[in-house]
Amino acid sequence: MVEREIKVAFSGGLRIDAEYRGFLIKTDQPVGDGGEGSAPAPFDLFLASLATCAGYYALTFCLSRSIPTEGLSVSLVTQREPGAKLIGRMIIRLGLPKGFPEKYRAAIAKAVDTCTVKAHINNPPAFEIVTLSGD
């Protein structure tokens, strides 16, 4: 089994940073939740990872077929019932470039649907929490 580790550092207040593969990913909580709003909240990064993953699959679909990408767009819309804590629906909106070949319309949607982040939501990994002694 291949393991990768993300190291977390507490940067003051509710700011929490993650170091992964040479990148520093900063997070904070919104002001309304006690943070300073200095960086995206962790859940915001989760949503952004889903949207950018979908974007990656849309982009590579077009590039692999030499389809011009000017005008290609992807957005993620979330819907939650009033008073609900969890999102009930996520809609990935795929804007196709002008002149996009009709024969590829269903295929690009299928490609976006294979996004790795989405696949992990649909088939979640097992979670395990291990406590380590501070001694």
Image (cartoon, rainbow, N blue to C red):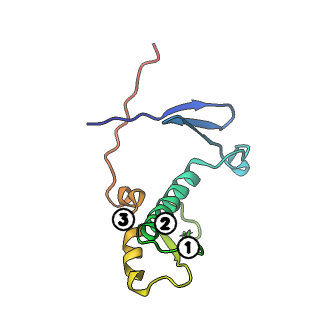
Of callouts 3 and 1, the N-terminal one: 1
Q: Is residue 89 left or right of residue 13?
A: left
Mark 3 or mark 1, whichever is nearer to me: 1
Q: Which residue does the numbered mark 3 point to in the structure image? A: 114
Near-viewer residue (106 or 1): 106
User: Could you tell me residue 30's position as x and y percent?
Assistant: 69, 50
As measured in the structure, the alpha-carbon distance from the residue carrying label 3 to the one carrying label 1 is: 18 Å
Q: Is residue 76 left or right of residue 15?
A: left
Of callouts 2 and 3, the N-terminal one: 2
Residue 17 lies, with reference to residue 95, above or below; the image says above
As measured in the structure, the alpha-carbon distance from the residue carrying label 2 to the one carrying label 1 is: 8 Å
Q: Which residue does the numbered mark 2 point to in the structure image? A: 59
Could you classify mark 2 by the number of other residues whose Cα lies within 10 Å: few (under 14), some (14-19), or many (20 or more)?
Answer: many
Q: Is residue 90 left or right of residue 2?
A: right
Give the structural element (helix, strand or loop) at label 3: loop
Q: Which residue does the numbered mark 1 point to in the structure image? A: 72
Q: Is residue 17 left or right of residue 133?
A: right
Give the structural element (helix, strand or loop) at label 2: helix
Residue 54 lies, with reference to residue 107, above or below; the image says above
Q: In the rendered structure, find residue 18 and report the number of the disc placed on it.
A: none
Of callouts 2 and 1, the N-terminal one: 2
Classify the position of the N terminus by image quarter.
Answer: top left
- Callouts 2 and 1 close, C-beta under 8 Å: yes
Which residue appears at 42% of the width and 68% of the height?
61
In the image, what residue type sits under mark 3?
A: Thr
